[in-house]
Image (tube, coloured by chain):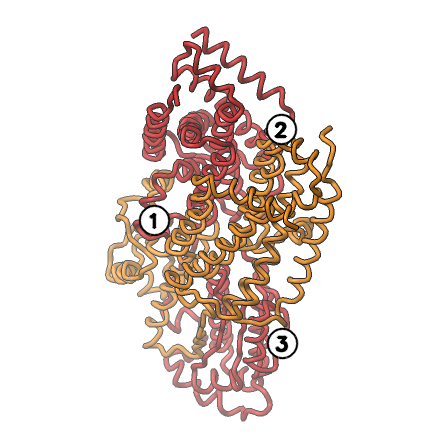
Amino acid sequence: MRQLLTFIRKEFLHVFRDRKTLLMLFGLPIAQIVLFGFALSNEIKNSRIAVVDYSKDATTTRLISRIAASSYFDIQRSLAGAGQLQAAFKKGDIKMAVIFPASFGDNLQHTGKATMQVIADASDPNQATTITNYLSQIVTDYNTELAKDAGQPMQINPETQMLYNPELRGAPNFVPGVMALVLMLVCTMMTSVAIVKEKELGTMEILLVSPFKPVYIIISKLAPNLLISVLNLIVILVLSWLFLDLPVKGSLLLLITCSILFILTSLSIGLLLSINAQTQQAAMMGSLMGMLLPTMLLTGFLFPIENMPLALQILSNLVPSRWYFIIVKRVMLKGLGITAVWREMLILTGMCLLLFTISLRKFKIRLQ
Amino acid sequence: MRTLIFLLEKEFRQILRNRQTLRTLLIAPVIQLIILPLAADYSVKNISLAVVDNDHSPFSQKLINKITASGHFRLTGYAASYPEALQMVEEDQADIALQIPSHFERDLVRENNKQLYIAINAIEGTKANLGGAYLASIIRDYNTDIRLRWQSTPTQPSTQPTPTQPSTQPTATQPSTQPAAGTQPSPADAAPQVEAVSTNWYNPLLNFKLYMVPAILVVLVTAMAAMQSAFNIVQEKESGTIEQINVTPIKKHIFILGKMIPFLVLGIILFTLGLLVGWIFYGVVPAGNLWVLYASLIVYLFAMLGLGLLLATYSATQQQSMSLAFFFINIFNIMSGVFTAVDSMPGWAQAIVSTFPPSHFIKIMRMVVLKGSGFSDIAWPLTAMALIGLFLNTWAVLNYRKTS
């Protein structure tokens, strides 16, 4: 036991001596929480659009001023003709163009019907859908008003309520996402270099010839990373509470228990990578190239998992951060208790035990 | 010049010798590019919906059918009460709860006005945003539908309402709604209508993969270029071989060029492989000129390799360079517009993002690949990238010391 403590102390010294790495490890979550929390938003506002008005009558003026008054649109300029549209789209100056054909107002008055054209830059499909919809809403509102005189019957008024996040801020989705991402990647990366570094520098030999149990080597390698991750977690929680107005709604104890479970799982992944890799570079590239994008995409905080092909949905079950992300959303944002997350906790526990056992088995006490 | 060639020979040998590195450098990104666009699908088509139908009328039934038939929504279940539906949202069984109040049909007919209650789980902002928009547009269509049917068949509705309602009620309101239309009441006569016909340019089928493949390729090239160049130099530092080079009369800039050119070549190879994968697996064919793409790529790699070099000059161990590189890459990935639009960020954040080389390159990629933009269209992002690259490289060269 005393041996173990001494070794843990050695590892701590190694980690805390490296100020630059430490700075990054703690700087990353802070920068991410601040940037993502304040900067990322899913609301699409002030989309730059162009208006081409061939009619220039009272109706088009009224419609244009309504579009201009909406906070969703920012009328960039009025183009003289539709010929300039292509160029403006290609430059990325505008996201949408609204075209009123000649005698728009006349048609409306005499035939009771007028058609305007809306062209959206669909290179970003979702943005195109959203802003087209905003525009239809404005047109519908205008129609309703036109119809007021004629007495529009049967008006359905949908009353929409945005639960948990009424302002559609990015933060409530991104904080749990960042927690999952940062904890997972920091743990995996830091651990993945831990053992292979000793191999590369040749100090592993010294460790192996000492009367020190292999499992102790592993535990002492994991201990500092566990501590750093828990500190990181606390920093993230405090920051999101103070700056992003996102307190932990549920039980803090439950959240921390689940987090430690998740951290241990990620540490085990790093361990496995470290044991398999030959060089630090390979371990790092493995943990970065191999883990970064899959973690980002398969966790479910950027893209909905139910949209993915079945094979990827199954694959996403293997990504621990997916389960942790669900836990954080339920406990932190919705304030649910253990009854809502016990299944996810069980999965994480299973993963952790399995990975750790495999690592222990694969850990070689001979060099070659 | 001759020294440079020798250095390049050495670097290429070192890279090609190590199979594991080569695997992670080229094969892993290609596999990721094949798989990940499948995961990055944000077209909203599976929003789960919990319905509380307190009306049980033909009207409410038709509304529910219309919503589920749209393809965007999946009916996960009927709830007996609104709180129960909210409970389903809370447990993630449903994303949206829709309540059709009792007497929905009767009140619509009698009072010409009725509320529908919708509650959306807004934690996932985009989904909530789009889901709400789709639902609103379906309800709008539905509203127009029933209105048209009502107006075109003025006598029919008396038989349609639920039996509990006296059939005289709807007809009583009829005269007030359509005073003018005595004969053949077509919708156009009822009220003047503006119709908005929308067209989607550059991606008419709203294929989300066309949008994601170019961006994911940039992310992969970024990870490779910036990190590998940093690791590579630091590796020499850590193993001590850099000392041997430092004592030779090799000039600083020759040494740096020798480190940068191999990764420039690797970056171009990876990019080409990526374009091929995009074409073969996802049918993404750049609409614009390939030379525009490759010229931008070289400028981009110059900037990112400069960053890698700069990180290398500030780190003593591979671990340090890794955590530094990770710091930047993680922030670049999320902030540069791969996943959320840069346009919807506040001004200060957009200013910060404009100093990130990937944000410009992703923009260029999407413009050239999807819209076929040319050099004149991308002049500004290209210049910005070149300036950032120049700045980073100058800083790195100034900061690189042959002696410690």
Tell which chain the image draws in orange: A
In this rendering, the answer to whether A268 lies above or below B146 is: above
Residue positioned 44% across, 42% down in the render: B332
Quadrant placement of the C terminus of chain B: top left
Residue positioned 54% across, 14% down in the render: B10
Q: Amino acid at mark 3?
A: Tyr
Q: Position of residue A54 (x, y in %)?
A: 28, 51
How many angstroms separate mark 2 from mark 3 (CA)? 65 Å
Residue positioned 33% across, 33% down in the render: B384
Tell which chain the image draws in red: B
Q: Position of residue B186 (x, y in %)?
A: 44, 71
Could you say which quadrant of the image residue B298 lies in?
A: top left
Asked if the residue under mark 1 is in contact with the one under mark 2, i.e. CB atoms within 8 Å, the reply is no
Q: Amino acid at mark 2?
A: Gly
Q: Amino acid at mark 1?
A: Ala
Residue marked by disc 3 = B78
Q: Position of residue B146 (x, y in %)?
A: 50, 74
Q: Position of residue B296 (x, y in %)?
A: 41, 29
Residue marked by disc 1 = B349
Residue marked by disc 2 = A202
- Circle 1 residues within 10 Å: few <14, some 14–19, many ≥20: some
